[in-house]
Amino acid sequence: MTLPPGLPGGDDAQPPSGAARDSRRSAKRGSALAPHEVEQVDLLRGWTVDELCLEVVNLRRAIASNRRIGAAVGVVMHERDVGYDEAFSLLRRASQDSNVPMVDVA
């Protein structure tokens, strides 16, 4: 798998500069990360670069889908004069009834 530029191992990958190297050293000491962040980093240990890149792509898609669905919920709330839960249920029902992913219904 060819990695995009800017990612570790990508076409333009370069060793870290002095400042980046120093910030990594301080992060290793634990001073740069909060306890919950350390736990999140520990969960990623052992992942390959390909797996991490795929995770980033999937998270970006999820964020875009979430925004689109949220906007659609807002429109339904306004048009139908209903609350968030009812608007979300209407979109979900339309998605299930038409066998179309919710993000496409939105």
Image (tube, rainbow, N blue to C red):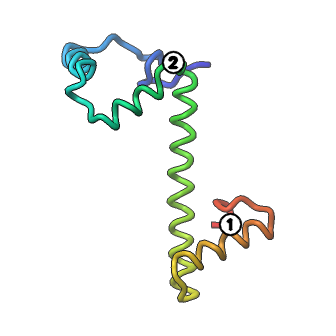
* Residue 81 coordinates in the image, percent (x, y): 53, 89
Q: How many marks?
A: 2
Crowd around label 2: few <14 · some 14–19 · many ≥20 (10 Å): few
Distance, label 1 to label 2, CA atoms, is: 38 Å
Q: Earlier in the sequence, mark 1 or mark 2?
A: 2
Which amino acid lies under the numbered mark 2 shown in the image of this protein?
Gly
Residue at point 20%, 26% (across, down): 31
Q: Position of residue 44 (x, y in %)?
A: 47, 26
| Closer mark to the observer between disc 1 and disc 2 | 2
1 and 2 marks in contact (CB < 8 Å): no
Q: Residue at x 57, y 55 (%)?
A: 65
Q: Secondary structure at mark 1?
A: helix
Q: Is residue 43 left or right of residue 102?
A: left
At x 41%, y 25%, the residue is: 6
Q: Which quadrant: the N terminus?
A: top right
Q: Which mark is residue 3?
A: none
- At x 45%, y 23%, the residue is 5
Q: Which residue is under mark 1?
A: 105
Q: Which residue is mark 2?
A: 46
- Res. 99 image quadrant: bottom right
Residue that sits furthest to the bottom in the current view: 81
**Looking at the picture, which amino acid does disc 1 mark?**
Val
